[in-house]
Amino acid sequence: MKKQWLVAGILGCITASLVYAQGDIPVKVLGQRVNLRAKAVAEAEVVGQVAENDILTAKAIGDEWVELVPPDKVDFWVHRDFVKDGMVTANKLYVRGGPGINYSVVGTMNKGESFTVRGDFGEWIRIAPPPSCSVWIHRQFVQVIQPEKPRAPEVRPGRPLAPPIESTEPGAVAMAPLEVPPVMPPVRPPEPLAVESSIPPPTDLVLIPLEGQGRFVQREGELRMVGFVFGAPSRFRLVRYEGNRSIVICYVRGNNTQLRSFIGKRMLIRGREYWVKGSDYPVVVPEQIVPRADTTAE
């Protein structure tokens, strides 16, 4: 048993090193006719190609592979038995990189979600890529686009003062003429804007000094307990699965009793996201938890 826990801990540390950035990150393609793959392995099937200088959106960036939002020109496939009139009828539907169960799963869709039909092949429907799906590109073929630095405000020179008026009286102090500012019409104060208050992070978390800390996010996956990982910022984490492989989305901090009741269940979490020192994944403090159905269909 100790050996199993040790192996699980080592695998957890290896997985933690695979992804060092998450979120919507713009990247630029560096090569001609670069392959997009269904999984983060060189042997995975090719689902599309991109050209040099194409701008893509990365969901996560690892040491070797980058997870991307699929470009619109990519085609995915779903089984016709679980859809009707461009809408999912199963509780959860696998989206695949080709027309058959031997092709890799590139994402899932939930019951009631709609999609665009592009064609069919036997029992399979060709569709436009849903945003919940992902494709992968090798890290060497993309470059992260850095945001432009804000320009410093322009400083205008001050208005020169009028020369002093000479006085003919002895002992008199020369005075400049008094400038009377023009009368401006009254300005109606702007209407107050509704400001969304952010939940402060737990006091024991040491935040990384980054912009956007505490931003509102929405994450979906299965809630799992964290194994014996030294320095983990929470006992709970949200994961998603690609076959038998689990990928960590984020840590979850909240009411422990409530979170334990969701262990092993799929859920949608809406809350505040924080990046902390010593963690490769963000910490989400939930404001709302929405349970998801767990019935799976091909």
Image: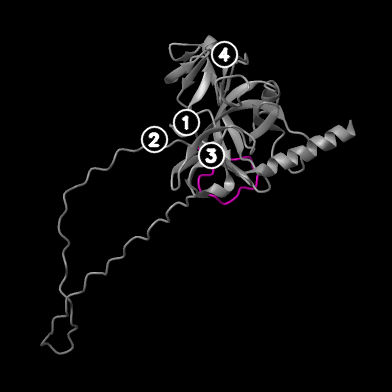
Q: Check contact, mark 2 vs mark 1: CB within 8 A.
A: no
Residue type, label 4: Asn
Point out the stretch of residues depicted in magenta: 198-215
The mark that comes first in sequence, 1 or 4, is 1
Question: Pointer 3: what residue?
Answer: 35
Relative to residue 165, is residue 3 drawn left or right? right
State how far apart marks 2 and 4 are (Cα).
Answer: 37 Å
Q: Which residue is located at x 76 percent, y 38 percent?
A: 11
Q: Which residue is located at x 72 percent, y 33 percent?
A: 235
Q: Check contact, mark 1 vs mark 4: CB within 8 A.
A: no
Task: Residue 237: tell me if it is visible.
Answer: no
Crowd class of label 4 (few under 14; some 14 to 19; many from 20; radius 10 Å): some
The N terminus - image quarter: top right
Would you place residue 130 above or below residue 207 in this image? above
State how far apart marks 1 and 3 are (Cα).
Answer: 11 Å
State how far apart marks 3 and 4 are (Cα).
Answer: 32 Å
Residue type, label 2: Ala
Question: Pointer 2: what residue?
Answer: 194
Mark 2 vs mark 1, foreground winner is 1
The secondary element bearing badge 4 is classed as loop
Q: Main secondary structure of the magenta part?
A: loop
State how far apart marks 2 and 1 are (Cα).
Answer: 40 Å
Residue type, label 1: Val
User: Is residue 218 highlighted in magenta?
Assistant: no
Q: Which residue is located at x 18 percent, y 78 percent?
A: 175
State how far apart marks 2 and 3 are (Cα).
Answer: 45 Å
Crowd class of label 2 (few under 14; some 14 to 19; many from 20; radius 10 Å): few
The secondary element bearing badge 3 is classed as strand
Residue type, label 3: Asn
User: Is residue 209 highlighted in magenta?
Assistant: yes
Question: Pointer 1: what residue?
Answer: 74
